[in-house]
Structure formats: C-alpha cells, structure tokens
Amino acid sequence: MGSGSNRRALKDGNFITLEGGEGSGKTTQTQLLHDSLISAGIETIITREPGGTPQSEEIRSLLVSGESKRWEPLTESLLHFASRNEHLVKVILPTLQAGKWVICDRFFDSTMAYQGYAMNVDRQKIGALAKMTMGKFAPDLTLILDIPESKGLVREEGLSSEDRYNKMGASFHKKVRMAFREIASQEPERCKIIDASKGIQEVHNSIWLQVKAKFNL
Ligand code: TMP
C-alpha cells in the first residue's frame, strides 16, 4: 500500500460517509442507501467506524463502553485513528480499488466533531493525524444527518451497552451537532446536511436525491 499522500490516486469506486449525532438514524439510512445502490446495479459494501475490521472492532469496544472519562481526549483520538488506519488499509482502499463503492457509518468528521470540537482536542493535531494516516484521501460525499440532540439522545436511550458517548450529556452532544454543521459549512461541496428529524422514508429520499445528483445516477 502506498503512503498516505498517494492513496486518493489509487481509488476507483466512490466513498460515501454518513455522519451525525446519536440517534440520528445513520445505521438504518446506511442500509437503505446500500439497498438503493445495489438496485441501481452498483456493487457496494457497508462498513462502520470505529470498527470495520476484527482489529478495529477490538479498538471499538475500548472506545464505546465504560466510563465517559475513561480516556484522555488525545489518547481517544489516537485510538480512533488507529482503528481507522486498519480499516482504511485493509478494507476501504482495497474495496474502492476493486471498483466497488463503500458506504461508511461515520469516518474522520466524527473525530473532528467529537474529539476536536466537543472534547477540545487541538484541531490542528487531529488534522495532522488525518494527514499522516489518510494523506489527501477523503470521502467523495458526506451526508450529515442533523437532528436536535435532545431528540436523538431519547431515541438511543437504553438501546445498547455501547453507551459511553451517550453518557457525555446534552451539552456535549449539542457541541457535536454544531460541529457537524460547522464542518458542512466549511466543505459544502463534499458535505450535505440532511434533516433527520423526518420519517425514515423521507430521510432516505433526501439522501438518495443527493447521491443521484452527486454521481449522475
Ligand atoms: P456509533 O454509535 O455511531 O456506532 O458510534 C460510536 C460512537 O463513537 C459514537 O458515539 C461517536 C463516537 N465516535 C467518536 O467519538 N469519534 C470518531 O472518530 C468516531 C468514528 C466515532
């Protein structure tokens, strides 16, 4: 595998990420988007972060369970990048290079939003880690599912033992929401905001419109 800086040049399929706060419906929407792309005749896989390889899933379990203050914020950022590097090298890049599309439930923007904006890790450090591991590689399209944090947290309540981030409180999740909006305003070509407070089918329709427009489907 080449160094980070030439990773982008090696890719062939398209890379779509879904981002958003807790309970924004990303996982359901990832599945629906996958179904639509397959119906359109496009070979596509679904994956997620943190996770996506056996090794990255091990790192995931360190991140999503236990006490909210379990990690120093910079350590936590490094763990997300460690997980991402495995995932990028072993799954995302080879799949794109094989000409397939990849839909990823969360990616780099989550590190910027959660660790950078909401946990106050120096955003330049996060940018430097991204450059080191990803070079110029970036999603072709990022769909940011936007929902008021109070609504999203209620949707998630008691759903899983992976609740470390849910325990971080409403003001933390408000910062995450604002961070995703800020990221979208900085990169309007790549990032599209989707109103995720609507019904499942309506949200899917908005996502599908964006995907069709971006890739001329
Ligand atoms: P999930 O519940 O969407 O699978 O994501 C697990 C949690 O990980 C979620 O609460 C957000 C958090 N997260 C970060 O804090 N930074 C990251 O870089 C990623 C990918 C996820």
Image (cartoon, rainbow, N blue to C red):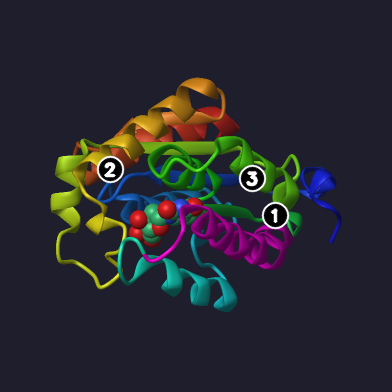
Assess whether mark 1 and mark 3 are in contact (beta carbons under 8 angstroms): yes
Marks 3 and 1, the one that precedes in the sequence: 3
Measured in 3D between alpha carbons, the distance from the residue under mark 2 to the one under mark 1, in whole angstroms, is 32 Å
Which mark is drawn over residue 83?
Answer: none
Q: Which residues are magenta?
A: 70-95
Ligand 1's image quarter is bottom left
Measured in 3D between alpha carbons, the distance from the residue under mark 3 to the one under mark 1, in whole angstroms, is 7 Å
Q: Which residue is mark 2?
A: 173
Marks 3 and 2, the one that precedes in the sequence: 3
User: Which residue does the image show at 42% across and 49% down from the upper left?
Assistant: 33
Q: Is residue 113 above or below residue 64?
A: above
Q: Is residue 66 above or below residue 209?
A: below
Assess whether mark 1 and mark 2 are in contact (beta carbons under 8 angstroms): no
Q: Which residue is mark 3?
A: 14
Q: Nearer the viewer, residue 184 or 178?
A: 178
Q: Is residue 43 above or below residue 15?
A: below
What element does badge 2 sit on?
A: helix
Task: Indicate which label's residue lies in the foreground, 2 or 1.
Answer: 2
Side of 62 relative to 167 (left or right): right
How many neighbours does mark 1 have within 10 angstroms: few (below 14), some (14-19), or many (20 or more)? many
Q: Indicate the quadrant containing the N terminus: top left, top right, bottom left or bottom right.
A: bottom right
What secondary structure characterizes most of the magenta part? helix
What element does badge 3 sit on?
A: loop
How many neighbours does mark 3 have within 10 angstroms: few (below 14), some (14-19), or many (20 or more)? some
> What x and y, as percent, mark residue 164?
30, 63
Q: Look at label 3 and name its amino acid.
A: Asn
Report if residue 34 is visible in the image: no
Assess whether mark 2 and mark 3 are in contact (beta carbons under 8 angstroms): no
